[in-house]
Amino acid sequence: MSNAKAVSDASFEADVINSEKTILVDFWAEWCGPCRAVAPILDQIAAEHGDKIEIVKLNVDDNPQTAMKYQITSIPALKVYKGGEVVKTIIGAKPKAALEADLAAFI
């Protein structure tokens, strides 16, 4: 479905919180239509801006602890982490241009 690396409750701290990179986490679920719609857009952004931002995916159904910790109540939820902190939150599917505008500070 997506080229993005999958992260889990178990790997979240190592893959996201302790990362030196700027990481965008796509909180999603298999049954979520808007999540499926945004996945190819995120793949395009990753291909074009992978040197500046890494995109990973966390399935909220399979990883409820992390989803609960970050208060994910609507999906898709995109959160940008820098230095272990959430620096940007984007809720809902958007066209590529809108997502790139939201992420302009990071890409």
Image: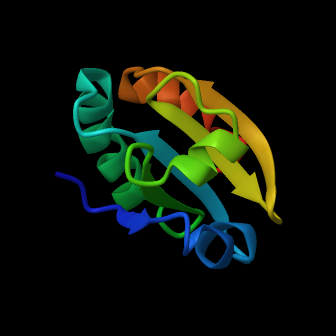
**Residue at 71% across, 54% down:** 81
Q: Is residue 36 above or below residue 42?
A: above
Q: How many marks?
A: 0
| Residue 62 or residue 3, whichever sits in front | 62
Task: Give percent across and percent down for residue 21.
Answer: 68, 71
83 left or right, relative to 24:
right
Task: Give percent across and percent down for residue 17.
Answer: 73, 68
Colour pattern of the rendering: rainbow
Residue 40 position by quadrant:
top left
Q: Is residue 100 above or below residue 44?
A: above
**Residue at 68% across, 71% down:** 13
- The outermost residue toward the left is 1
**Residue at 52% across, 47% down:** 64
Q: Is residue 107 visible?
A: no
Residue 95 position by quadrant:
top left
64 left or right, relative to 103:
left
Residue 33 position by quadrant:
top left
25 left or right, relative to 58:
right
Q: Is residue 56 above or below residue 86?
A: below
**Residue at 29% across, 41% down:** 39
Task: Give percent across and percent down for residue 38.
Answer: 32, 32
Task: Give percent across and percent down for residue 70.
Answer: 70, 42
Q: Is residue 102 visible?
A: yes
